[in-house]
Image: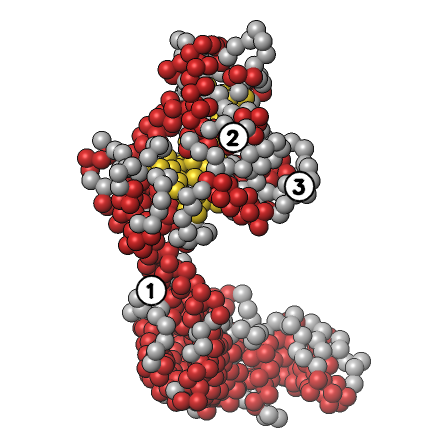
Amino acid sequence: MEALIPVINKLQDVFNTVGADIIQLPQIAVVGTQSSGKSSVLESLVGRDLLPRGTGIVTRRPLILQLVHVDPEDHRKTSDENDTNAWKNGRLYKGVDGEEWGKFLHTKNRIYTDFDEIRHEIEAETERISGNNKGISDEPIHLKIFSPHVVNLTLVDLPGITKVPVGDQPKDIEIQIRELILKYISNPNCIILAVTAANTDMATSEALKVAREVDPDGRRTLAVVTKLDLMDAGTDAMDVLMGRVIPVKLGLIGVVNRSQLDINNKKSVADANRDEHAFLQKKYPSLANRNGTKYLARTLNRLLMHHIRDCLPELKTRINVLAAQYQSLLSSYGEPVEDKSATLLQLITKFAAEYCNTIEGTAKYIETAELCGGARICYIFHETFGRTLESVDPLGGLTTIDVLTAIRNATGPRPALFVPEVSFELLVKRQVKRLEEPSLRCVELVHEEMQRIIQHCSNYSTQELLRFPKLHDAIVEVVTSLLRKRLPVTNEMVHNLVAIELAYINTKHPDFADACGLMNNNIEEQRRNRMRELPSAVPRDKSIKGPGGPSLSPSDQPQAEADTLKAAGALGDQEAGTGNWRGMLKKGEDGQADDKSKQQVPLPASPQKGHAVNLLDVPVPVARKLSAREQRDCEVIERLIKSYFLIVRKNIQDSVPKAVMHFLVNHVKDSLQSELVGQLYKPALLDDLLTESEDMAQRRNEAADMLKALQKASHVIAEIRETHLW
């Protein structure tokens, strides 16, 4: 078990070299108010004068003090146990005179045998960072003391808790010191040594208060009561040391330090320890063996070892996890480039392959948050584009009156016996043209997704590209330009697909012929139904001219229109003019006086003027009731338009995705690599494209150092035998 503390010291050395705070190592932090005797306690544990002492704030930077016990016969063996550069220090230690010496991390391999020198170095190093007028810093000083008179311990001496700023100290000095202390004692692997002076009330102890904040259960707090010899006459610390005032789970230990006069008179620590023992025997005989500096050192050693034993398994796991993380991080940064042309070709090929794989769906990195690549293109084709086409109404934007007007316009000056085919063709072309816009939008969406795949590949699949920002930008530029080049070609093809459908209306299409046949049967059936219903309610002449076929005589048509006009009442000039003329002819034969009076209502308008102007400009009023013949004609045209539109929509829905795949997606997939190589694989561009980003080399070195430290730490922990743990 004695081997555990040197192991932690080794780990501390390993991580100090890379300045890592990521691993929380077990250690003992000394906390207390200013001038409560923290540094004196540490000095008495070391047994030598090595820390700056005095009144006011003296400790202004954290001091990480590693005490290493060495065998007095052969102190050089410590080089094997406690130092990372064993062979170097093995040679250096041969020249060390004396049995105790110290080493600072910031002075590398320099050995200090004079402890006054160590104190001066601490003062100089403190002033170098914190200034020379009471300022503080959170950057620690690392000091190692090798001695046969110490037990293995790792201690952290922290600045004392203070309330009022002095000298150059900022106004928030109290908060700064508090945060600095909490930074160390918040580590769950840290034992807190709460130092309180005996001549103050324990209930006002700042050290215990701060310790309780981070360790409410008191599992890792040990209280030390200093200045037992300075208590008022007639008072003693018996109740405090017995734990009756404030109980502390790990115990309270009383110590007597040297006074400032003793220090000025160069009283040795050994003499001070002797005097302390005599004082305790005299004042607290029953507690003498459980107080004092020697007992404190042994207790700390025992606590630290048990604490390390408990922390070690978790520490081992954490080091292994971090090592794996840094290994993957380092591999993502890649190796420094040696053969530039090979690296460039490799990166281009890899990007092109990843781009194609993302479209095919065989990429290594599968996105789980959203659809991307080929899956999204498929979604655009069948969900977005498919649904948009299905939502297009075959008769959208066409009212019955529009259809009727188109039929009339197609007949010219002559009244038509049959529904003119030209009107069907014109109207169906107008409807088919509406499919062009969603088709071009589909091309645009696929183009956008092809652009997004570039970013997806560089983010997830080819992380090496992020090392070379210029190469990344160049690749993005080349692929974007290729996509931009293919966009007009694909749009042209999709435009042509719609134009092809418009160029020839194939009324002999098998599906269309079937639809027409079915429709004729339906119309015939409806006609029969109407014929059954009409005779009982309508005069005979109207029933004859109801829904009929092409067999109606020419004289029936004017009569049909005249009857429609009568039913609708007063209409626009156009309808009034033509209706009156036709109506008068027919009514002369039938002799229906009441019909004649109704027809003569609109006569005040000029027939000739109305005929000339309104035929061209005035639309047919929507409120007009259609005759059965007109209704039938409109119905026929509408059904034919719908039937033919559905056939064309089906064709477009099938052919547009195929055109987009051939002209855009597959073409880019096939020509991407050759395009990239042609544009970028040029000797003149090599150096420029493969310039690493400025911080990449630095990050790679940092990650490599950290990985090395973690591997070394893992190796150090692995050396401990299982028997050491128990």
Please state the horizontal and vertical placement of residue 66, each as a whole percent of the image: 39, 39
Q: Is residue 141 above or below residue 416?
A: above
- Which of 616 and 611 lies nearest the eye of the viewer? 616
Q: Quadrant of residue 564?
A: bottom right
Q: Quadrant of residue 514?
A: bottom left
Residue for badge 2:
266
Specify the quadrant that holds the C terminus: top left
Please state the horizontal and vertical placement of residue 505, each as a whole percent of the image: 43, 88
- The residue sitting at 50% across, 27% down in the picture is 267
Q: Amino acid at mark 3?
A: Gln
Viewer-nearest of labels 1 and 3?
3
Residue for badge 1:
331
Toward the top, the furthest residue is: 234
Q: Amino acid at mark 2?
A: Lys
| Mark 1 → mark 3, Cα distance in angstroms | 46 Å
- For numbered disc 3, what is the local secondary structure? loop
Task: Say whether disc 3 or disc 2 marks the residue closer to the N-terminus.
Answer: 3
Please state the horizontal and vertical placement of residue 671, each as a whole percent of the image: 36, 86
- The residue sitting at 68% across, 37% down in the picture is 166
| Mark 1 → mark 2, Cα distance in angstroms | 58 Å
Task: Say whether disc 1 or disc 3 marks the residue closer to the N-terminus.
Answer: 3
Q: Amino acid at mark 1?
A: Ser
- The residue sitting at 45% across, 19% down in the picture is 275
Whether the residues at callouts 1 and 2 have beta carbons within 8 Å, the answer is: no
Please state the horizontal and vertical placement of residue 624, each as a whole percent of the image: 64, 72
**Number of labelled discs?**
3
- For numbered disc 2, what is the local secondary structure? loop
Q: Residue 169 has which mark?
A: 3
Task: Say whether disc 1 or disc 2 marks the residue closer to the N-terminus.
Answer: 2
